[in-house]
Image (cartoon, grey):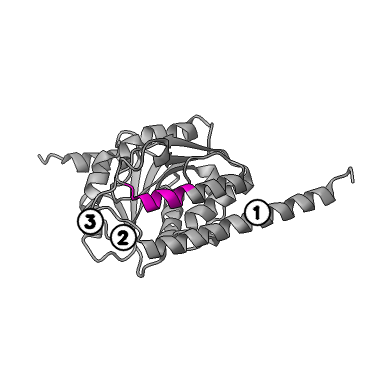
Amino acid sequence: MTVDTPQEAQQQARRTRTPSVVVVMPAYNAAKTIERTYDDIPHDLVDEIILVDDVSADETVEIAKHLGLDVIVHPQNRGYGGNQKTCYDAALAMGAEIVVMLHPDYQYDATCIPALIEPVRDGTADLVLGSRFLGDPLAGGMPRWKWISNRFLTGLENLAFGLRLSEYHTGFRAYSRRLLRSIDYHENSDDFVFDQELIAQVVRAGFRIKEIPVPTRYFEEASSVGVRRSVVYGLSTLGVVARHVVRSARDRRAARRRSPDR
């Protein structure tokens, strides 16, 4: 008689029930961190784990398959946003009611998934962000220049979106199925600014957003966007904010013209 390994038992248990909570991981060269990220996932709450690989040059795909994940490999690099589009398409096709997006670089604490999905489960939010800024990101190793740029962009987004969030730029999020089926995320960029474009769509659609505190972890093996890409990302985010402000003003004017009181 053969005895299943713990990983095989977890995989078999996930396959015997209809997916409710699906974790998706957009991956690129995550071989050094993916197993640690996987080990921290609360497998009793998560029904399926999908990894979408963007033509990694390391052993990301081999390790993910060894762990028993559902692995999708892009034939060519589609970018961070393009990767997420595949992630969400696959999760929805599985019937997921809650989709958790988790970077596989071990910067985010996957043991926080129960707290992350609770507002979606109890119906008080459609999008939950895991915020490093509800704690002390500098103590967790965040470079000060990233801290400053995050604070600046988050402040502008709060003004534009009419919200009071502590962070918009997190790689740890939970979405309701209703939100992902209502938002046309395919119209967004294939680059890093995808996240901010999606939030702008969520705000315009009137979905509820909450956030929970998560610890910050910066270390050598974790992926990190360099200064040049961060500048491009920052400018792209400013573009998202500007377009949102213009579109919101246009929508308000159109609503006033349609008002029967005028």
Q: Name which residue lies at 21% across and 42% down.
A: 7
Q: Which residue is mark 2?
A: 28
Q: Position of residue 190 (x, y in %)?
A: 46, 63
| 262 is higher (above) or lower (below) than 84 | above
Q: Which residue is mark 3?
A: 31
Pick the quarter of the image with the N terminus. Answer: top left
The amino acid pointed to by label 3 is Ala
Tell me which segment is drawn in magenta: 142-151
| Measured Cα–Cα span from mark 1 to mark 3 | 40 Å
> Residue 245 got which mark?
1
**In the drawing, does residue 180 fall left or right of residue 137?**
right
Q: Position of residue 260 (x, y in %)?
A: 88, 44
Which residue is at the front of the view, 167 or 15? 167
**In the drawing, does residue 229 fall left or right of residue 1?**
right
Neighbourhood count class around disc 3 (C-alpha, 10 Å): few under 14, some 14–19, many 20 upward: many
The amino acid pointed to by label 1 is Val
